[in-house]
Each structure stands twice: as C-alpha cells, then as structure tokens.
Amino acid sequence: MQTPLLIIGGLVLLLVTFYVAREFEYWKHVLYTSRHGQTLETGPDKYPGVSSDELIKQAFEAERRGDIQNAVERFMAARQKNPSYRGILFHVGQLRYENGKFDEADKLFEHAIAFGEDVAAANHSRGLIAVRHKNLAAAQRHFGAAAAADPFTAEYHYSWAEALRMDYHPKEAMARYEHAALLARHEKDRSLFKIRMARLEATDPTTVAAEVEKQRAEGDLSVDWLMTAAALEIRQAGTGEGARLIEEARARNQASLFVPCVTDMFFANAASKLPDIAQACHPEIATTSP
C-alpha cells in the first residue's frame, strides 16, 4: 500500500513543480514586459488558432528557406503564446545579428539576459555589437559578464582581451589572453601570439625579441613566431624584413593560425600606413586596387 502512495505522491509533486515553473516563467514575462512597454511582442494574437508548437515548426521552416522576417515573426508569436519557451529570444537575436540588424539584435540579447536565457552567449554577442559600434567600455562589460557566466569558454576571455587591447589596456589584456590560452583546446597558439603582441605594446620589446631568438635557436620559426618577428621588425622600422617574414608565414599555408595573426590590430594599423606591409598582409587586395 505504501509504494503506490509514494508513486502517486511523486507524480503529484512532479506536476506541481512543472506548474510552478510555468507560472514563474509567465509572471516573469509579465513583469518584464510591464516594465519595458512594447519592447517584446505584447500586441494582439497574429496567429489565432495556431499553437505555439506549430508556430515554432513554421518558424524553423521559414528560416531554412531564408525567409527570416517570417521566421522572426513566428518565433516571437510562439513566445507570446507560451512565455515558458526558452531560447527563442537569443535565437531570434542571432538571426537579426547575422542579417546585419545589430540594434535589433542587441535589444533581443538584452531581453534574453533579463530572462536568464543563454546569458553567457547573449552577453558575448552584445560585446561583439559594442565593438562594431566602437563602444569599447560596453564591450568590455559584456565580455566580462559572458566570462563570469561561463568561465570555462576560452572565446569569452579572448574577446575580452581583444577589447582591452583596442582600448589601450595591453597589461590587463595579457591576463585575459593567458586565461584563454589555458582553456583553449585547438587555438592555444593564437592566444599565446596575442600575449606576445600585448607584451610588445605594454613593455620594452627586448623581452619578446629574446624569446624570438630563443625560438630561432631551436629551429625554424612557426607561423605565429614568424609573425611575432615581423611585428618586432616593423616596430623597429624594418618594414622590408617585416614584409618578408609575413610572406614567409603566409607561404606555410596554415590559414587557421596565419589569419588571426595577420588580422591582429597591430598589423591592421601597420598596413594602413605602410604600403609594403599592406601588400604582404593582403596581396589579394593590394594587387586589385586601382
């Protein structure tokens, strides 16, 4: 007799928990939308008689055929019908981001964070948008929040470091790059290269120069070390040797490492001022320019 009662009690508890969770999401939705007016879908039902599940299905079908506006409308309508659907705000934000609607995307990511949905990824995306808008203080806040919400994702620390360097804080950036290198599974060399670049900006270059010479003594320089050596030459006005080293790194055909190096802000800045460096960094652009 006791076992059936325990089973029944467990089922009742499960149902109550499910109901409370749904009600919590609903009232959180009501509270947020009451504070933020019409920033979320709160108008009349555009799809009467269509369930939220069916709207989600239709939205994904529209997304697959490239009808993004239709997909967005159905995703948001599904969430209006059922506020307990999690992940919609972030997903729609990503759709807007990928289509260049950055202000709309930023607002959707803000809503996702407020509802506790995909907090780390949404903050990271807001940071990327802030970088595009050259709001580096906001970018650092968002990347820092992403790293706090998910401290084991290397990319969040890496992006945070990049924003710090852009804002002329290379010493602070080094610590973030080091954390990214510690966590990285496949792109550790990229972060280690960035640490050396930040060190070049923050301290006397002799330390980095000594590291390059040590690597040379051990054998051929890898792509990231060739690019480090190129940066040293450019900094010391040796643009001809710097360009040669960049071309040597390019010839290794290791795009996964060369591209993050050659697109680093140091080389972007040098290429904007020095034609031979621009030619070495981006020959496909230089050779087609009128």
Image (cartoon, grey):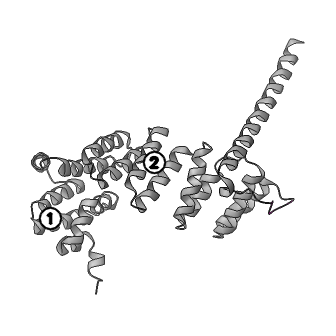
Q: Determine which quarter of the picture holds residue 11.
A: top right
Query: SS for tag 1?
Result: helix
Give the residue pinned by disc 2.
142
Neighbor class of circle 2 (other Cα within 10 Å; few <14, some 14-19, many 20+) is many
55 sits left or right of 186 in the view: right
Q: Is residue 161 above or below residue 39?
A: above
- Which quadrant is the C terminus positioned in? bottom left
Q: Which residues are magenta?
A: 44-48
Query: Between disc 2 and disc 1, whose residue precedes?
Result: 2
Q: Is residue 46 magenta?
A: yes
Label 2 to label 1, Cα distance in Å? 35 Å
- Residue furthest toward the right? 1
Seen in the picture, residue 82 relative to 4 is either above or below; the reply is: below
Write the residue at 27% across / 47% down: 192
**Camera-side mark, 2 or 1:** 2
**Residue 153 appearing in the image:** no
Please state which of residues 100 and 231 is positioned toward the viewer in this rendering. Answer: 100
Type of residue at label 2?
Answer: His
**What's the amino acid at mark 1?**
Gly
Q: Nearer the viewer, residue 186 or 106?
A: 106
Residue 238 in the image, given as x and y percentages of width and height = 9, 65
**In this picture, residue 105 sits left or right of residue 289:** right
Tell me the quarter of the image containing the N terminus.
top right
Tell me the residue that label 1 is attached to. 242
Identify which residue is drawn at 26% across, 78% down. 286
